[in-house]
Image (spheres, helix red, strand yellow):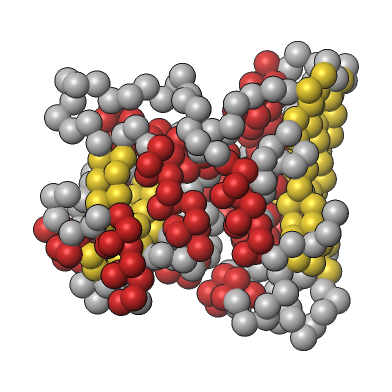
């Protein structure tokens, strides 16, 4: 398959997701609740907000777009007109903290470059708002812990933007991993990558992105293996590859890594910014199950030893926000909480140490 740019991938994601088909595990908030819908402010109006999150509100049962935060005046004007956002609900990064005084906004959704996730999550919590933070949760474990502490101290919920927890094919592989209808799991192959050509993008800047593809795409590969097994890895080995030094500076172009789990399961994973790959394959004692494409959002397809998986297309972003709204309504932690994001950063840090040193890293 040909390599694709991030812009092309974003466009295909938007086409592939379709409209919300309904998820039985996410009921609509009932009339007994004080508020049927929760107001969300998007912080950062880049491609993901523009192409996916903004349109997703039209399919949300429990959330609506109440406000925006942007440093670009032209975007503020465009979004206000398109989404009917009142001027009092539009902020820039200097006025962000005034969001504390706005009762229309219940949830702040952080959609900024990775190096700003911790700062704005903590500021949102101090402003008394619940928080959704896009993946990866932060640049390192220390930042994740500070984000969790800030939200706990403020008595607000924190969720990470793991949209695939609300995608039916991925929900099915979670079920198959837990119930083991094909016997014990032996081997997992989990990979995501695409061609990222522009060396000026912040994702290729280690200080802003945190480490290249492992932070951006590798999170999906890690998540896939972790939620199939249902346990945390106990050791990690990794190999970092760097061929194009003019494009990749201080980060690996490609990383292959292996995760060993307590029950003996092994996950062989890869992530890259120079090739297209998108699959999750699980080999069991009596069969297999697989998603290909899996993580990228271009339209998931799956099969098992017994035949193809057939599930409806859902709007993952709407379902994700609705799930978080339900958690707020029921005053319970999100299943994709800050602690879940922290676990992935622990793995990422171990992967990078293993690639740098050539040693097995124990967790």
What residue occupies the far bottom of the structure in this picture? 246
Instruction: Please state if 107 lies on the left or on the right of 206 as rendered.
Output: left
| Residue 213 to residue 346: above or below | below
Name the quadrant containing residue 202: bottom right
Residue visible at 67% across and 46% down in the picture = 298
Most foreground residue, 199 or 222: 199
Q: Is residue 264 visible?
A: no
**What is the count of numbered marks?**
0
Q: Is residue 322 visible?
A: yes
Residue visible at 66% across and 61% down in the picture = 8
Name the quadrant containing residue 10: bottom right
Residue visible at 60% across and 47% down in the picture = 15
Q: Position of residue 259 (x, y in %)?
A: 76, 45
What residue occupies the far front of the structure in this picture? 81
Most foreground residue, 145 or 50: 50
Most foreground residue, 360 or 51: 51
Q: Position of residue 269 (x, y in %)?
A: 79, 49
Residue visible at 73% across and 52% down in the picture = 192
Instruction: Please state if 248 lies on the left or on the right of 16 as rendered.
Output: right
| Residue 281 to residue 255: above or below | above
Task: Report the quarter where the N terminus lies.
Answer: bottom right
Q: Position of residue 167 (x, y in %)?
A: 57, 33
Q: Position of residue 93 (x, y in %)?
A: 29, 73
């Amino acid at each position: 398959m040909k390599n694709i740019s991030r812009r092309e991938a974003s466009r295909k994601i938007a086409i592939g997701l379709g409209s919300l088909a309904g998820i039985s595990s996410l009921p609509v908030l009932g009339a007994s609740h004080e508020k049927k819908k929760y107001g969300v402010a998007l912080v950062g109006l880049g491609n993901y907000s523009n192409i996916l999150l903004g349109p997703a509100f039209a399919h949300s049962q429990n959330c609506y777009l109440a406000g925006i935060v942007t440093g670009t005046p032209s975007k503020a004007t465009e979004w206000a007109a398109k989404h009917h956002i009142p001027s009092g609900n539009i902020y820039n990064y200097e006025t962000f903290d005034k969001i504390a005084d706005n009762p229309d906004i219940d949830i702040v959704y952080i959609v900024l470059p990775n190096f700003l996730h911790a700062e704005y999550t903590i500021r949102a919590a101090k402003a008394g708002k619940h928080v959704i933070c896009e993946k990866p949760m932060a640049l390192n474990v220390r930042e994740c812990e500070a984000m969790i502490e800030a939200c706990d101290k403020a008595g607000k919920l924190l969720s990470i933007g793991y949209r695939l927890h609300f995608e039916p094919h991925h929900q099915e592989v979670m079920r198959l991993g837990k119930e083991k209808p094909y016997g014990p799991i032996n081997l997992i192959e989990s990979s995501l990558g695409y061609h990222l050509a522009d060396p000026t993008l912040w994702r290729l800047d280690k200080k802003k992105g945190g480490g290249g593809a492992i932070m951006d795409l590798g999170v999906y590969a890690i998540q896939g293996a972790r939620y199939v097994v249902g346990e945390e890895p106990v050791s990690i080995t990794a190999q970092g590859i760097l061929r194009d030094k003019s494009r990749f500076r201080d980060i690996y172009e490609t990383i292959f890594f292996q995760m060993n789990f307590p029950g003996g399961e092994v996950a062989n994973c890869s992530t890259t910014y120079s090739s297209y790959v998108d699959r999750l394959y699980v080999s069991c004692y009596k069969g297999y199950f697989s998603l290909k494409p899996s993580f990228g959002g271009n339209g998931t397809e799956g099969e098992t030893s017994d035949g193809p998986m057939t599930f409806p297309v859902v709007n993952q972003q709407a379902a994700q926000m609705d799930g978080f709204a339900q958690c707020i309504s029921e005053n319970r932690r999100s299943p994709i909480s800050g602690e879940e994001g922290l676990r992935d950063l622990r793995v990422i840090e171990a992967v990078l140490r293993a690639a740098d040193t050539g040693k097995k890293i124990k967790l």
